[in-house]
Amino acid sequence: MPIPVICPGCKKSFRVSEKFAGRKGNCPNCKHEIVIPAAAPEIKVHAPEAFASGGKTKAGELITKPIARRTVQWNPVAATIIVGVSALILLIAFIGGKAGIWSRWTISPALLALSPLLTVAAYLVLRDDETEPHRGKFLWYRGMICGAAYAFLWGGFEYLGAYGLLTGELWTWLIILPPFVAVGGLLALATFDLDFGNGTLHFGFFALVTILLRVTAGIAWPWQQ
């Protein structure tokens, strides 16, 4: 391939055949002596398939192939199971409420058992799509830890209501509810790596379902017991 040359005298540029690389000669324009530089090494363009498995270094060693990102696909079977189990739980709560078997003491173990399902279902909806999701048994471990923490946090409402610190008046909720929601958001951040905003929504979903179950089961509010 031709070698680009610039005359140091007249600054004129021209191209010289690579067979004259390293030789001396006179500029055709000003007759100033110039030295033809050596030819640049040829650049080899590798085909894309050469790096399909990660490629190789100059020494011939394999380059580690990047880890492909795995996306979470919508699973209709799992969604159907979650909806079906949720409907069954509501039905059990309704029937148990009509039969009078639910109380603040019998509903607590049921809520504790249900909490992992609620927290995992809410996480799958609220998680950030740009981050690697939690999967498998470790997801359920996180769900059990978060669910147990939520259940004990919800027990705080029972405690405050039983001692008259939480009533049906709105001003008591405006004072007491924000700290509980903030703690719930921090728990979701610590267990599921959700940001604080989505963490508060995560706890809010748990609280909403808990209230719905309480109403369905016919259990009185803490300050009414």
Image (cartoon, rainbow, N blue to C red):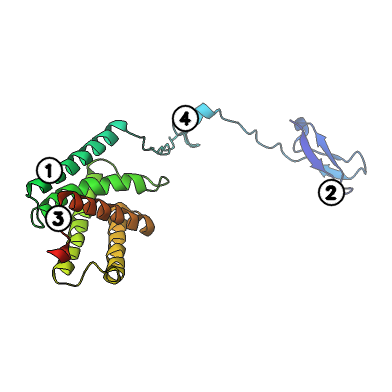
Judging depth in this view, the residue of 186 and 21 nearest the camera is: 186
Secondary structure beneath disc 4? loop
Res 1 quadrant in image: top right
In the picture, the disc for residue 168 is none
Q: Which label's residue is closer to the chain start, 2 or 4?
A: 2
How many other residues sit within 10 Å of disc 4, few (<14), some (14-19) or many (≥20)?
A: few
x then y, percent, for residue 11: 86, 47
- Label 2 or label 3, whichever lies nearer to me, is 3
Q: Would residue 13 be seen by someone viewing this image from the given angle?
A: yes
- Label 1 or label 4, whichever lies nearer to me, is 1
Q: CA distance from mark 3 to mark 4?
A: 62 Å
In the picture, the disc for residue 52 is 4
How many other residues sit within 10 Å of disc 2, few (<14), some (14-19) or many (≥20)?
A: few
Judging depth in this view, the residue of 68 and 109 nearest the camera is: 109
Q: CA distance from mark 1 to mark 3?
A: 13 Å
Q: Which label's residue is closer to the chain start, 1 or 3?
A: 1
How many other residues sit within 10 Å of disc 3, few (<14), some (14-19) or many (≥20)?
A: some
Judging depth in this view, the residue of 40 and 45 nearest the camera is: 45
In the picture, the disc for residue 95 is 1
Q: Would residue 141 be seen by someone viewing this image from the given angle?
A: no
The residue labelled by disc 2 is 8
Whether tag 2 and tag 3 are in contact, CB under 8 A, the answer is no
The residue labelled by disc 3 is 219
Secondary structure beneath disc 1? helix
Asked if residue 147 is positioned above or below residue 48 in the image, the reply reads: below
Q: Which label's residue is closer to the chain start, 2 or 1?
A: 2
x then y, percent, for residue 126: 36, 48
Q: CA distance from mark 1 to mark 4?
A: 60 Å
Q: CA distance from mark 2 to mark 1?
A: 98 Å
Q: Which label's residue is closer to the chain start, 3 or 4?
A: 4
Q: Residue at x 45, y 34 (%)?
A: 54
